[in-house]
Amino acid sequence: MKPRRAIKTDLFADEHHRKKIDPLADIDSHIDFASLAAEVDKVAPRPVSAQGGRPPYPTETMVRILVLKRLYNLSDEPMEYPLLDRMSHKHFCGLANTTHVPDRTTVWTFENRIGAAGAKALFDGVSAQLLKKGFIARGGQIIDATLVPAPKQHKRRGEKELLEQGAMPADGKPAKRRQKGIDATWTKTHGKRHFGYKRSINVDKKYKIIRRIETDTASTHDSQHFDNVFDAGNTSRDVYADRGYPSEAREAWLREKGFWNQIQRKGKRNKPLSECQQRRNPRIAKTRARVEHVFGALEQMGGKLLRTIGQARARFAMTMMAAGYNLKRLVDFRRAGVEAF
């Protein structure tokens, strides 16, 4: 019988473990949350109550809570418990010595206050800080889209028309109406039907950081978001995309602007791909596949299913996921010793 391996002890084990498993200290040391809070207050000013009462929590505290939600894929109610129980979360949000912590209603109210515009301000603020640290978009840009499922809505005949008009069925209740979404749509891809929304992103090839993001309903074609997420500031002229994006007009536009077309070709009826084009597509696919790593990370942050009602809240959630992903990328760079250049 093999002898049991002796357990090695270390006086500094707790500090070593904390650095290894908790990225919050790294995020806190590299991101200026006060600046992010100021950007949010510009688009969604703090409310002023003439009746007095308890003042709202600082915007910076609430921004940090939203980041925690996306990093650990928590909803409003479960988010309250780590703020009461985990010291790392308390320190990160500046709540270590406070009597009260924001509850789920406070978090929900803050999200409604800043809305999609506030989420976009956070995403842009994180992007600006990454640029200042030298993580400039280099090596080319990769554009792609993915479907984000939403809870399927079961509506009776004639109920959808009433909901679209803002009315409510005769036997309906306000609480039930709030749970009925009319924005998400159906689409069909690869022979399967999907219900929800679509997220288009622009990822730079070198760092796999999300540079642009656009959200819409699932039935929107991928190519319609190309212009919105295109990044003219990428220092490389290579533009990668799959077979859902090619068109003669787009190729001519890229050529006119001096960009190198790395969009996969798509065969047409009675006009199959040439042997040269068939060899070209796999070469592009090896690079374009890097965007799938990003989509996989976003799924781990809650992108497998959006549990929200309405396109505005869906846009908020998807934009916050993108901002949280970029924060995680920065921590990964620092831990791996990657230097920006």
Image: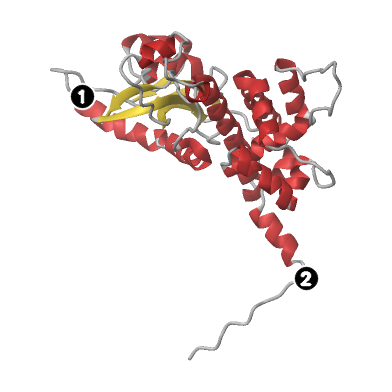
Quarter of the picture containing the C terminus is top right
- 337 to the left or right of 102: left
Percent of width and height locating residue 95 = 79, 43
Q: Residue at x 32, y 23 (%)?
A: 187
Q: Residue type at mark 1: give it.
A: Leu
Above or below residue 113? Residue 65 is below
- Label 1: which secondary element: loop
Above or below residue 60? Residue 27 is below
Percent of width and height locating residue 33 = 75, 33
Quarter of the rendering containing residue 165: top left
Q: Which mark is residue 11?
A: 2
* Nearer to us in this view, 241 or 102: 102
Crowdedness near tag 2: few (<14), some (14–19) or many (≥20) residues, C-alpha within 10 Å: few
Q: Which residue carries the number 1 mark?
A: 273
Q: Which mark is residue 28?
A: none
Percent of width and height locating residue 203 = 50, 29
**Residue 147 visible from this viewpoint:** yes
Quarter of the rendering containing residue 131: top right
Q: Farthest residue toward the left?
A: 270
Q: Residue type at mark 2: give it.
A: Leu
Q: Residue at x 77, y 23 (%)?
A: 38
Percent of width and height locating residue 77 = 62, 40
The answer to which of marks 2 and 1 sits earlier in the sequence is: 2
Q: Could you tell me if the residues under marks 2 and 1 are in contact, i.e. CB atoms within 8 Å?
A: no
- Label 2: which secondary element: loop
Q: Residue at x 44, y 38 (%)?
A: 304
- 139 to the left or right of 47: left
**Residue 32 visible from this viewpoint:** no
Q: CA distance from mark 2 to mark 1?
A: 65 Å
- 259 to the left or right of 35: left
